[in-house]
Image (cartoon, rainbow, N blue to C red):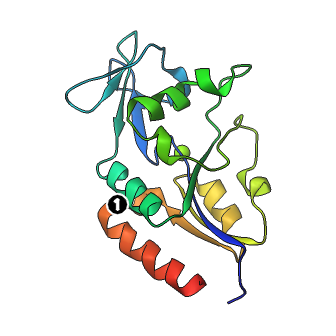
Amino acid sequence: MKPYKNKKVIFDLDKTIWNCFDKHKNEIWAKQLVPPFKLESSGNVVDDVGNFCQLRSDVGYFVSEVNSRGIEISFLSVGARLNLPMEFQPSYLLLKKFGLLNFFQGDNKLLYKTARKINFLSDDIFYIFIDDSESVLSDLELKQNVLAIDAKNITTWMGLIKKVDNVLNKID
Ligand SMILES: [Mg+2]
């Protein structure tokens, strides 16, 4: 395998690391949440009008394990609200509330839904890219330097860390 300059893990957010709902439990996007947010004892984050967001179980473990291996972590999401600086974006505030923001030290991007994620990758970096979107996943299949993981197939994030280790050891 050709040597890469670096290895990175990229996360989609909506329906990959979390699921958000309105107060009637209909699925919504994180960008629809209304700050301020509150972390409840259930582990859910609730917004100002009763919408809530559930982090998938063991995502925190997974992210901290990847971080402890010295691998750069970032998010690349199409869940941006128009004309809002990053520090006010609902997705950013959610990561903060879930206590995960500090792990995301990479080149984080919140894009608008028309953006194509594949355009934000470079060829000399090896990526593990976790996303639930079929169009993103099929785009990523074209790239030799990307291991795309379909978030819909993740049964345990604890199990996924082993897969990540196996792949990254082969890249070295
Ligand atoms: Mg998604």
Of residue 108 and residue 21, the one placed in the foreground of this image is: 108
Identify the residue shown where x is 44% and y is 13%: 36
Image x and y of residue 146, in percent? 65, 70
Vertical order, 41 against 111 (above or below): above
Of residue 92 and residue 153, the one placed in the foreground of this image is: 92
Of residue 87 and residue 18, the one placed in the foreground of this image is: 87
Identify the residue shown where x is 43% and y is 46%: 17
Image x and y of residue 141, in percent? 66, 70
Identify the residue shown where x is 46% and y is 35%: 95
Q: Residues within 10 Å of mark 1 (few under 14, many from 20)?
A: some
Q: On the rendered image, what quadrant is the C terminus found in?
A: bottom right
Q: Residue furthest top?
A: 49
The residue tagged 1 is 157
Residue type beneath disc 1: Trp
Is residue 144 visible in the rendered image? The answer is: yes
Vertical order, 41 against 126 (above or below): above
